[in-house]
């Protein structure tokens, strides 16, 4: 914290920025959805918000040390394009997979009874859709932390040692597919219309960018509703009891209902990451979870060249943000 952080303009800006950037993204998305090439224009808006966040990260960083390069920028962007871009990448530049899935798959989903309250105002339908989708996101994210065979994919996201806008979309594609499946399928089955998917995609995109932002924003009561940077910084803690919390991607409703909401009155940790090790290269990171050796590297277990595991006897044998406390046995035989 510097002196300028106490000045009234700085304080005012720190309160305004989260809602302002979120609102700007949604207004931009509204224009994009009415344009002739909605996905193209949505991407333009998305990139504009990315640049705005990146600029404010330089001007008023939450953690100065997170401005330092970590050598992962290429990998971060590559994983974003692969996992978030998904189907959309084929047609345009990558943005968010939910939008692509909605656009491509929705016309083919027919023949299911229409249970969706389509007569409600669109914004209410979107709010309902967000709550339903969030349940799937919550279950998928919590499972990714509590089930080691899923943690092997999610660890990539937690392997970063700085949070900033560029590593927002750093997810292994298997991790993303699992999340998309659990969050989108219920909406398809209920018969939610395309605009609901598009707006949920937009909300997810902009809240996602903001959760990782290294801007010194203040969110106060918003922490009770949305997944804010403050809550997500706790989620990236190396300390298990802090990291296995705040699973919400957009809303924190399910965290509050299931007791995983965590927002103590102190500063979130700047030293984040995992004790396991992920591969250095993009391709290596993609392949690592699929081999037995790679899986153990991700968990932080040392492996002898002949494949035998070496007992380390320290906490490093377990993923700090994985589900297992140091007193539990890791059962790798059935899952590796
Ligand atoms: Zn996580
Ligand atoms: Zn994150």
Image: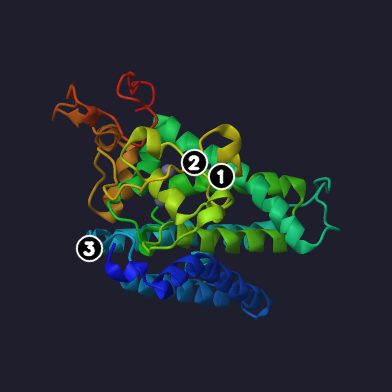
Mark-to-mark CA distance, 3 and 1? 31 Å
Mark-to-mark CA distance, 2 and 1? 6 Å
Q: Say which residue label 2 marks.
A: 141
Tell me the SS state at disc 2: helix
Q: In this view, does 63 lie above or below 113?
A: below
Q: Say which residue label 3 marks.
A: 68
Report the image quarter containing ligand 1.
top left
Q: Are marks 2 and 1 in contact (CB under 8 Å)?
A: yes
| Residue nearest the viewer, comparing 190 with 161 | 161
Q: Is mark 2 within 8 Å of ligand 1?
A: yes
| Position in image of residue 81 (x %, y %) | 42, 62
| Residue nearest the viewer, comparing 275 with 306 | 275
Quarter holding residue 22 = bottom right
Mark-to-mark CA distance, 3 and 2? 28 Å
Tell me the SS state at disc 3: loop
Residue at left 54%, top 33%?
259
């Amino acid at each position: 914290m510097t002196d300028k952080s106490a000045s009234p303009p700085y304080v005012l800006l720190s309160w305004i920025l989260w809602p302002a950037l979120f609102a700007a993204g949604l207004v931009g998305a509204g224009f994009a959805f009415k344009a002739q090439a909605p996905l193209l224009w949505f991407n333009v808006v998305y990139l504009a918000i990315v640049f705005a966040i990146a600029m404010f990260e330089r001007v008023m960083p939450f953690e100065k040390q997170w401005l330092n390069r970590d050598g992962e920028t290429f990998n971060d962007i590559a994983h974003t394009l692969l996992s978030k871009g998904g189907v959309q990448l084929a047609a345009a530049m990558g943005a968010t997979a939910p939008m692509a899935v909605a656009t491509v798959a929705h016309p083919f989903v027919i023949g299911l009874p229409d249970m969706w309250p389509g007569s409600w105002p669109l914004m209410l339908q979107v709010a309902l859709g967000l709550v339903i989708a969030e349940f799937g996101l919550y279950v998928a994210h919590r499972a990714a932390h509590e089930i080691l065979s899923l943690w092997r994919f999610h660890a990539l996201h937690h392997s970063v040692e700085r949070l900033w806008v560029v590593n927002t979309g750093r997810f292994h594609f298997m991790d993303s597919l699992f999340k998309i499946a659990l969050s989108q399928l219920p909406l398809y089955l209920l018969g939610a219309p395309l605009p609901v998917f598009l707006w949920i995609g937009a909300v997810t995109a902009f809240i996602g960018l903001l959760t990782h932002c290294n801007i010194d924003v203040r969110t106060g009561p918003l922490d009770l509703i949305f997944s804010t940077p403050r809550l997500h910084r706790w989620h990236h803690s190396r300390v298990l009891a802090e990291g296995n919390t705040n699973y919400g991607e957009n809303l924190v409703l399910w965290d509050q209902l299931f007791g995983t909401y965590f927002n103590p009155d102190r500063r979130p940790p700047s030293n984040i990451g995992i004790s396991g090790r992920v591969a250095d290269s993009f391709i290596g990171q993609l392949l690592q979870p699929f081999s037995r050796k790679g899986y153990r590297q991700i968990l932080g277990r040392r492996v002898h060249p002949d494949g035998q595991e070496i007992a380390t006897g320290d906490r490093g044998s377990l993923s700090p943000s994985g589900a297992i406390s140091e007193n539990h046995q890791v059962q790798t035989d059935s899952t590796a």
